[in-house]
Image (tube, grey):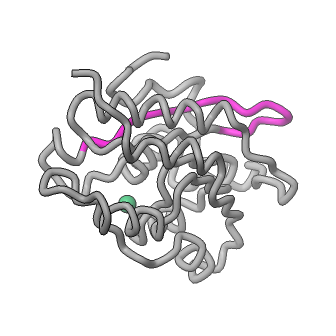
């Protein structure tokens, strides 16, 4: 995989704005383990460099194929910005190459997107969202095991709630590979 710690380069040619011709993600869409596993690998790399172990992948569905367009890990700590969530950063990166709207793209995230990142999903008209652990899981872990360095704050507004308020009927698949994603909380970094 290119760009172990940076966002991968876009694959293929950027769209020229023909949004109306793009296919929406069908309601029968089934999340794929391999994409969440890639997000988990990105999360581990993030933790290895001192960031929160949170990873995201954006795929594109083209006919019967689904390909990775970008993948990245969280950089809140190493960037020094508490709002540089990996979901939003990855969405910004992909939309800069593929256009304002992303109805044929899927966002995979190891952790449930916060209200801000879910809002970005509404504005970019992402096709679907898949996440592992929920905001409740983050809160529960933070209360029990949060440290000064890794507090694991959460914002208890569900991703689904925000997407529904956006009235776009964006499918959300929560708790996908949740056990694997939960293990990320206690992932020991390779120093
Ligand atoms: Zn966020």
Please give left or right for residue 48 compared with residue 123 in the image.
left
Residue 176 vertical position relative to residue 191 in the rendered view, above or below? below
* Residue 42 point in image, percent of width and height: 43, 31
* Residue 189 point in image, percent of width and height: 29, 29
Which sits in the foreground, 165 or 51?
Answer: 51
Residue furthest to the front in view is 144
- Among the 4 quarters of the image, the one containing residue 79: top left
* Residue 184 point in image, percent of width and height: 43, 42
- Among the 4 quarters of the image, the one containing residue 116: bottom left
Q: Find ligand 1 in the image and state its quadrant.
A: bottom left
**Which is the main secondary structure of the residues drawn in magenta?**
strand
Which sits in the foreground, 50 or 125?
Answer: 50
- Residue drawn at x 50%, y 60% is 112
Quadrant where the C terminus is found in the figure? top left
- Among the 4 quarters of the image, the one containing residue 164: bottom right
Please state the extent of the stretch shown in magenta in the rendering: 60-75
Residue 53 vertical position relative to residue 165 in the rendered view, above or below? above
- Determine if the magenta segment contains residue 61: yes
- Residue drawn at x 57%, y 46% is 108
- Residue drawn at x 57%, y 52% is 132
- Residue drawn at x 36%, y 41% is 53
Which sits in the foreground, 184 or 82?
Answer: 184
Which sits in the foreground, 38 or 81?
Answer: 38
Please give left or right for residue 147 compared with residue 84 in the image.
left
Residue 140 vertical position relative to residue 68 in the rendered view, above or below? below
């Amino acid at each position: 995989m290119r760009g172990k710690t940076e966002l991968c380069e876009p694959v293929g040619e950027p769209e020229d704005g023909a949004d109306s011709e793009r296919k929406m993600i069908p309601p029968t869409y089934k999340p794929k383990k391999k994409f969440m596993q890639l997000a988990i690998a990105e999360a581990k790399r993030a933790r290895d460099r001192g960031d929160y172990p949170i990873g995201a992948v954006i795929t594109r569905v083209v006919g019967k194929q689904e390909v990775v367009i970008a993948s990245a890990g969280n950089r809140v700590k190493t960037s020094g910005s508490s709002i540089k969530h990996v979901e939003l950063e990855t969405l910004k990166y992909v939309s800069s190459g593929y256009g304002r709207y992303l109805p044929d793209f899927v966002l995979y995230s190891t952790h449930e997107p916060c209200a801000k990142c879910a809002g970005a999903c509404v504005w970019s008209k992402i096709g679907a969202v898949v996440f592992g652990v929920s905001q409740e899981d983050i809160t529960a872990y933070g209360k029990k095991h949060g440290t000064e360095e890794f507090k694991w704050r959460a914002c208890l507004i569900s991703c689904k709630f925000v997407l529904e308020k956006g009235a776009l009927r964006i499918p959300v698949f929560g708790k996908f590979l949740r056990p694997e994603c939960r293990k990320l909380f206690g992932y020991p970094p390779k120093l």
